[in-house]
């Protein structure tokens, strides 16, 4: 894995950036060091990046903005967020935007290497260039264009979804009227182990429900002891 793996380290601190890059290089990874989002864009224009280690707090375009932009782009790659802030809110926001792991500074170098290897193992077969999609899903008077990620309600008005909410809704639309447990939702939305962010799915579910519950009836139903069920029938157009 390490012989062909390119890791982008996006860190604005000129002292920390070469330390992280050197650490990963000693472990056998190929590394490109980036001072910010523009450097990352230039690196990605030349080669496929297999994993991004992304600092949260940076001047200009911060880590959350970069993460959001990467997740909305045509290619996806695993992201580990690294930050001096250890607040749980930051972790949830990062995961909602699509980060695969989160590490607070100061960290043990061995932990960073271990998390890097773990994320690569979990995601190496799942982060592939997406196939063009224009499938339209219709349910309870709502529609979702999977290609453009455009969700419209019964009045034809657009409803904005985060990347995590879109992934979750796609799971329900492709498995309608079927009880899905939390482990299945975690596996099918980000295809990673539930640790350490197994509670993030609850936040995503709550927010998606609020956006969909403007309909006449509750779409995502809780099944006691079982999980969750997407109640409406779904039609592929």
Image (cartoon, rainbow, N blue to C red):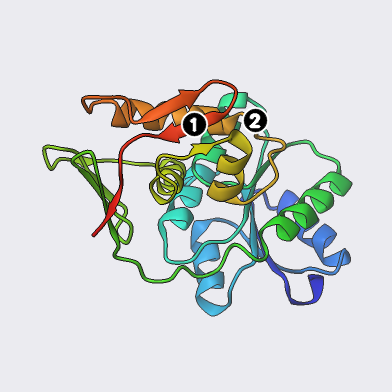
Residue 148 sits in quarter: bottom left
Q: Is residue 115 something one can see in this rendering?
A: yes
In whole angstroms, how far apart are the C-alphas of marks 1 and 2?
33 Å
Task: Locate residue 134, reporting x and y percent.
Answer: 29, 65
Task: Locate residue 103, reporting x and y percent.
Answer: 71, 39
Are the residues at dot 1 and dot 2 in contact (C-beta closer than 8 Å)?
no
Task: Locate residue 194, reporting x and y percent.
Answer: 68, 39
- Decide: is 123 above or below 93: below
Task: Locate residue 92, reporting x and y percent.
Answer: 56, 32
Residue pointed to by mark 1: 228
Q: Is residue 56 something one can see in this rendering?
A: no
At 69% from the left and 53% from the top, the residue drawn is 14
- Decide: is 66 above or below 1: above
Residue at the farthest left position: 155
Tell me which label, 1 or 2, sits earlier in the chain: 2
| Residue 6 vs residue 173, the one in the foreground | 173
Residue pointed to by mark 2: 85
| Left/right of residue 84 with respect to residue 74 in the rendered view | right
Q: Quick one: quadrant of the C terminus?
A: bottom left
Disc 1 is placed on an element classified as: strand
Judge depth for marks 1 and 2 and give the one in front: 1
């Amino acid at each position: 894995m390490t012989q062909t793996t390119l890791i982008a380290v996006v860190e604005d601190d000129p002292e920390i950036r070469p330390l992280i890059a050197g650490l990963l290089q000693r472990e056998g990874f190929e590394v490109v060091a980036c001072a910010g989002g523009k450097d990352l864009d230039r690196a990605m224009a030349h080669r496929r990046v297999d994993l991004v280690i992304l600092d949260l707090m940076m001047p200009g375009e911060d880590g959350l903005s970069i993460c959001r932009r990467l997740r909305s782009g045509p290619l996806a790659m695993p992201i580990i967020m690294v930050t001096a802030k250890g607040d749980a809110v930051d972790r949830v926001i990062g995961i909602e935007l699509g980060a695969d792991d989160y590490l607070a500074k100061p960290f043990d170098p061995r932990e960073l290497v271990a998390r890097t290897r773990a994320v690569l193992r979990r995601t190496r077969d799942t982060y592939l260039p997406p196939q063009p999609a224009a499938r339209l899903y219709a349910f309870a008077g709502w529609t979702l264009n999977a290609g453009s990620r455009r969700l419209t309600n019964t009045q034809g008005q657009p409803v904005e979804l985060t990347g995590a909410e879109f992934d979750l809704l796609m799971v329900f639309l492709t498995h309608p009227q079927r009880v899905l447990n939390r482990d299945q939702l975690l596996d099918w939305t980000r295809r990673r182990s539930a640790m350490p962010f197994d509670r993030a799915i609850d936040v995503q579910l709550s927010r998606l429900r609020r956006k969909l519950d403007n309909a006449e009836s509750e779409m995502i139903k809780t099944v006691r002891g079982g999980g969750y069920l997407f109640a409406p029938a779904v039609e592929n157009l």
